[in-house]
Each structure stands twice: as structure tokens, then as C-alpha cells.
Amino acid sequence: MIKLFDSYKKKLVEITPTDNYFKMYSCGPTVYQYQHIGNLRAAWLPDTVAKVAKLNGINVSWVLNITDVGHLVGDGDEGEDKIEKGAKTEGKKVEEIINFYTEDYLKQASSINLDIPKDKNLPKATDYIIGQMKLALELVSQGRAYILNDGIYFEASANLDLEVPFDLNKSGDSTFTGREIHNSDRQPGDFALWKFVPENTLQKWRFNHFDETANDVLRVLQKLNDPDLFNLPNRWGVPGWHSECVVMNKEIHGDGINSLDKHTSVIDVHFGGEDHIDIHHRNEILQSEALGFHLSKYWVHNKFVLVDGTKMSKSLGNVYTIVGEKKNTGFESIQEKGFDPLSYRMMLMEHHYTVQLDFTWDKLEQSQARLYNMRKEIAKILSLAKTESIEIDKKFVKPNQPVLIDILNNNLDCPKFLEMFNDLVKTTIENGVITKDKLMDILFWENNFLKMDLIPQIPSEIYKLGDQRDRAKKAKDFETSDSIRDLINQKGYQIDDYSWGFGFWKK
Ligand SMILES: [Zn+2]
């Protein structure tokens, strides 16, 4: 079984899927700007766990959300909405901002071969507004949240009865949530479920707009004995950031936000960056427990990506993405610097998710060298296999060395996996002879897990150039053979010579 590190239990836990089905959720991007390499690490982790689960024969349902509303500046609840701010700075419509940055995020993810969820498993927060309204109103009606002139707040001190994996009293320290307290009625551990916004706000909703929520509002106002509490039904507002994941999980993986089924956890593992442990995920857990259900059995977080030992920031000019032209936007892509996007995938694999990854250009160069070395070695093996007419079974059903799966099952030890895979590659040809089982294993791992373009599709045109070069070399026409080599390189391929012939790989 797969073991991962649970941040609240502070130990390794065995992930046991329900009915051989693994339900996972990870907090996705807020689409008001480009996503940096650290954000991509937070998608790499669940993607990698999903791939390992599948290797174990377990079905996976992974949901990743797109936050397209209401994520206030800073991860607390104060300040301006990030998407509003993005729209105003760029002079664009909110939908344009959302679509543009969502597209870019998906491009970044696919450039390092992540299989990002699709369709209903890639939900937008704005598609679940009713659920977020219902959640806020239900908590008010239970006396676990309160309404102020500027929003609806979860009340930490009214929820001390809940069994949660952290110290609720710690929230008395205002630094705990990193948030300023403007309203004297609010306590530091409280957080916004709903924020009222001015009428000129670009994204906004009203409680009385939906039939489904109008009745809930009446019920709450009657219970509070105030038919016009801050004009609740007609006030414009946006959901608080911490509610959307609860609602989407319950709607997509559970039995809906209306159901208050208590007995099971909605999902198996909830993922996120380490910054979510103390605020965002704490608040997700509180809301779920207050509503009477467990959100997730386990909570797994990846550590941050630093750059040259410090946090990435636009003011330092060290915020990096993977692909695309990003210069003069406060971002820069590693592709613009001339790197293969997959060298960042290699870098992610080289660092355990429970340690911070300190990105430097030197380290990226080393990761790229390692990647190219692997491609070079595998090109050699494939060339010999072709010469020896070794038949390749394309199904890649299972590896001959299950020990590599055990390494991944043990808290996703990708660095160890890479070492073992390297040994596998190095020992596939011994004394000029290929071990076919090992060749099959290389193909299996590349296709099902590594996904580093280790086995390139070589166009027939390149093979033809290789043959021409070979003939020129045999005729000792080195000028021609060198110029054909240059042409092959220009087309993006490398050609290597061996005692039995030649082979290609991609740079
Ligand atoms: Zn979340």
C-alpha cells in the first residue's frame, strides 16, 4: 500500500482506498496571474501520487479546482480581490483574465507532462456559488457563524466542541492567521465565509437571486429574529476563499452540500502547498466538522520551492514559470533561458516533496544534464535493440522489477527511484548484449511514470539523413557527413555513433 506523510498526524500514513477507488483533491491556482514553478510543484505531487496509485491497480478520481473568484490579496481575508485587481490592472474583462491564466496554467502543467484532471474534475469556484451560500447560511443558522456589516464569518470560539487535528485556541494569536483585525467583533481565528462587496464590483452575487438560497435566507433571518439583518438578501457579495474546496469536494466526491451525512470522510487525501496547513486547510477542516462530516482522511502537503534560498517575489525578479514568453511581466520562463521544460520535471523528481526545493540555475543545468544523459543512454539501447531485431511488446503491462514500485509506495521516494532507474539503464547492455526484461522495464517506467520523453518518435526523414551520413562517412567524405550531422542537430535531434551503427535522441 502507498504511504504518505500526513501533516496534521505528523507521521506516515497508509492510504487505503475505499472500494479500490482513490478520491483525491488538491487546491488549484487562483487565475489572476501566471503560476510559478512552486505552484506547479503543488500539481506535480497529486499527479505523481495518482500515477503511483494506478501502478498499484487502484482507480483514481483527482479533483483540482480553479479559483476564479474572491481570493483576497494575501491569504487572509482582508484587502482587494486578486481577480478584480488583475482585471483593473490589465484593463480587461474578468472572464478574459480567468480564461487567459487558466489556459496558461494548463500549458505550464502539460509542458512537464502532468495529467491535469478534466471536465467535472476541474471545477471552477463560480460554478458552485449556491453551495457556498448554503454553507455560510447553514453555519449561521447553527450558531457557528455570525453576520456583520461587511460579511459572514465563521466563529472559532463557537466551535470549540469540534474535534480537530490542531489547537483551536492557538487562533487567539493574531499572527496565527496573519491577518489584521478591523472589526472589534471579529476574533483572530474567525474567517470569512462570505464578503459583502460594493455594487461596482465586477464579480458579485446576491442571496435572493437563487430560489435555492432565498428560503435559507428567510430561515436564518427568522431564527436570528431580525427580518432585515444588514439587508442580507439584497446585498452583493462574493464567497470567502476557504469554502469553495469544501463545497466542491462534497458536491463532486460526496453526497452534496445539502446532505449532512456524518459517518464517512468525503475523500481519501487532500493535497496542497505547505502554506495551506495553518490557514486554508485549517479553515476547510473547521467548516466541514462544523457541518458534521470529515472532509478528508489524510492531509498531504508539498514544501515550497525557493529560488537561491529565498521566497520568489516579483520585486526580486526571481519568479519563474516553465514555458512561454514571460519577459517584462514580472515572470520569466525556464524555456526563455534555453532549458528543456522537462528538466524541471527531473528537478521535481530529484527532490522529496517533504523538503523544500531550492531552485538555482546551476541545479537546473545539472537536472538537464541528467535528463539528456538518460536520453542518450536509452537511444543507445534502442539502437542495439533494433540492430538485434528485438521485438518490443508495446503493452508495457507490468514491470519485471516490482521493487521500484515499492520504493514509490514508500512515501513517494522519487530521488531513490531515479537512482534505481539509472542503474537499470546502465546495466541493460552488458558485454554488448541487451537484457530484454530490463529494456521492457525502461519502456514501462517511461510510459507509466517518468514521462520525460526518453523514447523519442524519430521521423523517417531523420533516419534517412542518418543513412546518408553513414554512407558519406564510409566513403571518407567527412565534410558531407559533418554537414549532415549539423542538419540533424538543427532539426532538434542528436545522432550518436556506436560500434554497431547509430541512434538518435532529442535535446
Ligand atoms: Zn482549498
Image (spheres, helix red, strand yellow):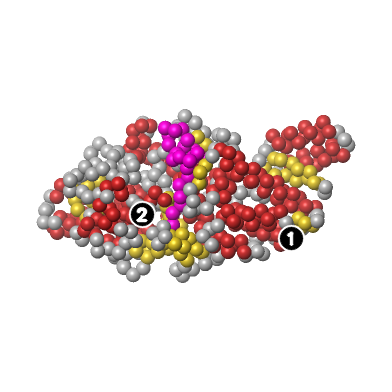
Q: Is residue 127 visible?
A: no
Could you tell me how far apart the alpha carbons at marks 1 and 2 are, in whole angstroms? 48 Å
Q: Residue 319 in magenta?
A: yes
| Element class at badge 2 | helix
- Tell which residue pokes out farthest to the right in this image: 475
The quadrant the C terminus occupies is top right
Q: Nearer the viewer, residue 332 or 127?
A: 332
The region drawn magenta spans 300-322
For image coordinates 73% across by 37% down, the residue present is: 488
Q: Report x, y in % for residue 420.
A: 64, 57
Numbered badge on residue 174: none
Quadrant housing residue 51: bottom right
Image-based side of 507 in relation to 28, left or right:
right
What kind of residue is marked 2?
His
Eye-nearest disc, 1 or 2: 2
- The reply to whether the residue tagged 2 has its Cβ within 8 angstroms of ligand 1 is yes
Q: Report x, y in % for residue 389.
A: 79, 56
Q: Are marks 1 and 2 in contact (CB under 8 Å)?
A: no
Image-based side of 12 in relation to 290, left or right:
right
Image-based side of 201 in relation to 252, left or right:
left
Numbered badge on residue 436: 1
Answer above or below: position of 51 versus 87. Answer: below
What kind of residue is marked 1?
Lys
For image coordinates 37% across by 65% down, the residue present is: 265
Answer above or below: position of 391 versus 305. Answer: below
Numbered badge on residue 281: 2
Q: Residue 32 in magenta?
A: no
For image coordinates 48% across by 45% down, the residue present is: 305
Density class for disc 1 (Cα within 10 Å; few <14, some 14-19, many ≥20) is: some
